[in-house]
Amino acid sequence: MRTGTGLAVAAALLVAPMAAFGQPAATIEARQANFKAIARAFKTLNDELKGARPSVATLRRAAAELAQASQRIPNGFPPGTGPEAGVKTEALAAIWTNRAGFAEAANRHIAAVKALEAATQSGDLERIRAATQAVGPTCKACHDSFRLKT
Ligand code: ASC
């Protein structure tokens, strides 16, 4: 049963970081903190690019943080952590009723962020600027369909 156990452990490792089954509040809090980290890293990139001499090291660091956090998005919405959980959340039920659409929107965002991370590795500021500008619409696209308008 080594393989079975290995698979179970692998599955638990995939899901455990954000999807604490039976604890919707903890899962919701963790994913909200993750989105705050995303917004913070994205702001750092935009602020840095507005400066007279943007630091490529700062841009690289922020892009890496953004990439790490963005890749956690798909695991942050296990069943039972929607509006029905009775916890304050802006997550719309559409995330769970249109799983494929949500996954697609999340994956578009992740792809844009990975392209940005690659751009920061090049050190080419105009390329980094363009890649940063390409990320914003992928945030908005997901919010338009899957986040409560407040
Ligand atoms: C941000 C932020 C978002 C996105 C979104 C892009 O800085 O916090 O949620 O950009 O506004 O349209």
Image (spheres, rainbow, N blue to C red):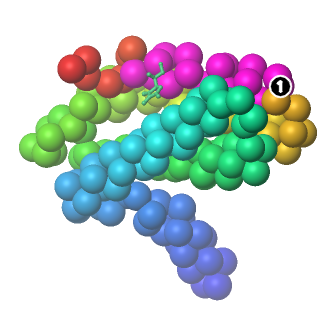
Report the magenta residues as a range: 126-143
* Whether residue 132 is visible: yes
- The answer to if 137 sits in the magenta stretch is yes
Tell me where residue 21 appears, x and y as whole percent. 30, 61
Identify the secondary structure beneath mark 1. Answer: helix
Residue 2 falls left or right of residue 74 = right
Tell me where residue 112 appears, x and y as whole percent. 68, 29
Which amino acid, mark 1?
Arg
Residue 68 falls left or right of residue 81 = right
Crowding around mark 1 (Cα neighbors within 10 Å: few <14, some 14 to 19, many 20+) is some
Looking at the picture, tell me which residue is in the foreground, 86 or 2. 86
Looking at the picture, tell me which residue is in the foreground, 53 or 148. 53
According to the image, label 1 marks what residue? 127
Residue 94 falls left or right of residue 103 = left
* Whether residue 31 is visible: no
The main secondary structure of the magenta stretch is: helix
Name the residue rendered at 63%, 26% in the picture: 50
Name the residue rendered at 90%, 39% in the picture: 122
Q: Quadrant of residue 90?
A: top left
Q: Quadrant of residue 77?
A: top left
Name above or below for residue 94 compared with residue 35. above
Q: Residue furthest bottom?
A: 2
Looking at the picture, tell me which residue is in the foreground, 130 or 125. 125
Quarter of the image with the C terminus in it: top left
